Image: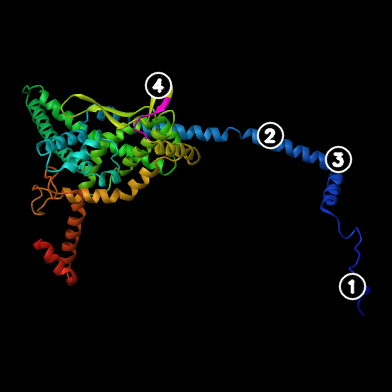
Amino acid sequence: MQPASRISGTRPVLSSRMVRPPSLIWTSLIDGWLSSPAAVTSTILGIVGLAFALYQFRFVPRERKRETLDAMQKSFKLSQKSRGVVLPALPHFLLDARADLAAKLKQNPCQRPDLVLEFSDWKEPTDTAAHEILCNEAKFRCALFAIGHVIDFRAEAGAEAEAAAAAEAASAGAQAVGRVTDTPTEQDAAAMATHTLWTGSKRLITELNDFAQLVELDLFPEDDVLGQFHRAIAPACKAVEPVIWSENVLGGRWGLRVLRLQLRAEHFNDVKPIHRASALQWEGKRGAGEDRVTLIRAPLYEDYYGEHAPSADLPRSLRLRLAVMARWVRITKRYGGSRLRLHLRDENKLLGRLRFACEPMNPDDPDGPQRLDPNDLNWRLGDVDVLIDKQREIQQAEIPGNAATSGIAARAHVA
């Protein structure tokens, strides 16, 4: 038999004990807690104990921050000696390369007016990221010139080091038999200075590369590293930039983190309002013996006695972009921006193009002419990819059993 409520169609009426509003539940719990002195006492003691524990551990984040900063300073200080040896005396190979290209274009200004225009627009050895070199023939040729200067400098340092070692051995032998030896000449001292510069630059690249690895692994925060050292990082990285190119052209991957660290330092200088009105510079030797202040990153704003105003050649769109990036890096604490992303994208491509251009034309003659001579104005930057494709087809055809490309390789040989 069904209940009367279901027969009549009305809902059953529930008593107040069966359904209680949430407000009444909380009210009853609070009333019960206040009516118990033991519960009140235990709660107050718990709050006091928690506050005391938090107060005791208040120095832990600061102490960890201090330890990180100490480790960062010690790690960067490892390169202080190398920087002191290399930066004042190392020739600026990229400036010498610009001088070589300028002299070549001056001899034949009408042969390549497009190259003359590119070179005239590139007034300082700045903006040398991988994608920026690959889209500018003047920069690409200067990179080849610079690699040639580095190779000559390394050969000179090696030969002079061997001569100095032979002279030292002869001096030791003469002293053993009781003969008086000649004092070292200025030429011997210059030879050892060249060798010291070369070994110092290699050591500096290794030390900066190790430091950059710690930065990329987030062991040292980029904001702290660049805020304290970006004016020391930028000239050191710029000085050894052509050396890194030449060493990677000869084989292997070495020191590329240094170039990425340089881009981070340049981006930090751009987006920080306190720094963007001052230029990044390197005071070094040009190559002929005179000192030269080399521009690494031009200031985007001008300083008028404490007030910053945008430079005349800074468009409004770039100013808006800088304002957005300045606020974005406050959140992310990471630097490099789009230049670093594009550089990472084209890093291997640039090394491959430079390696192809510097390879000897005849593999059996390593000392012969290279594939692309920067003094030869007949080839263009767009021809490099075409020549690489032809070389790839030839190499694939030489693989045993790869007959599909044999006809292509034959036509490439004929061409």
Which comes before the other along the chain, label 4 or label 2? 2
| Label 1 residue SS | loop
Q: Quadrant of the C terminus?
A: bottom left
**The quadrant where residue 410 appears:** bottom left
Upstream in the sequence, badge 2 or badge 1? 1
Residue at point 44%, 30% (across, down): 273
Q: Amino acid at mark 1?
A: Gly
At label 3, counting other C-alpha atoms closer than 10 Å, the crowd grade (few under 14, some 14-19, many 20 or more) is: few
- Separation of marks 2 and 1 at Cα, in angstroms: 63 Å
User: Range of the magenta residues?
Assistant: 308-314
Considering the numbered disc 4 on the image, is that residue within a helix, a strand or a loop?
strand
Task: List x then y, in percent, for residue 307.
Answer: 44, 23
Of marks 4 and 2, the one in the foreground:
4
Which residue bears the numbered disc 3?
37
Q: Secondary structure at mark 2?
A: helix
Label 3 vs label 1: CA separation? 51 Å
Pointer 1 residue: 9
Q: Amino acid at mark 2?
A: Phe
Distance between mark 2 and mark 3 Cα atoms: 23 Å
Could you say which is closer to the camera, residue 149 or residue 12?
Answer: 12
For the point 40% across and 42% down, the residue is 337
User: Does 274 sit above or below residue 252?
Assistant: above
User: Where is residue 174 drawn, in percent x and y?
Assistant: 7, 27
Residues at circles 2 and 1 in contact by the CB criterion of under 8 Å: no
Q: Dot 4, how many residues are within 10 Å of its Cα: few (below 14), some (14-19), or many (20+)? A: few
Report the quarter where the N terminus lies.
bottom right
Number of residues whose C-alpha sits closer than 10 Å to that of mark 1, classed few (under 14), some (14–19) or many (20 or more)? few
Q: Is residue 176 left or right of residue 332?
A: left
Find the distance from the CA under tag 4 to the CA under tag 2: 52 Å
| Image x and y of residue 68, in percent | 47, 35
* 302 lies left or right of 90: right
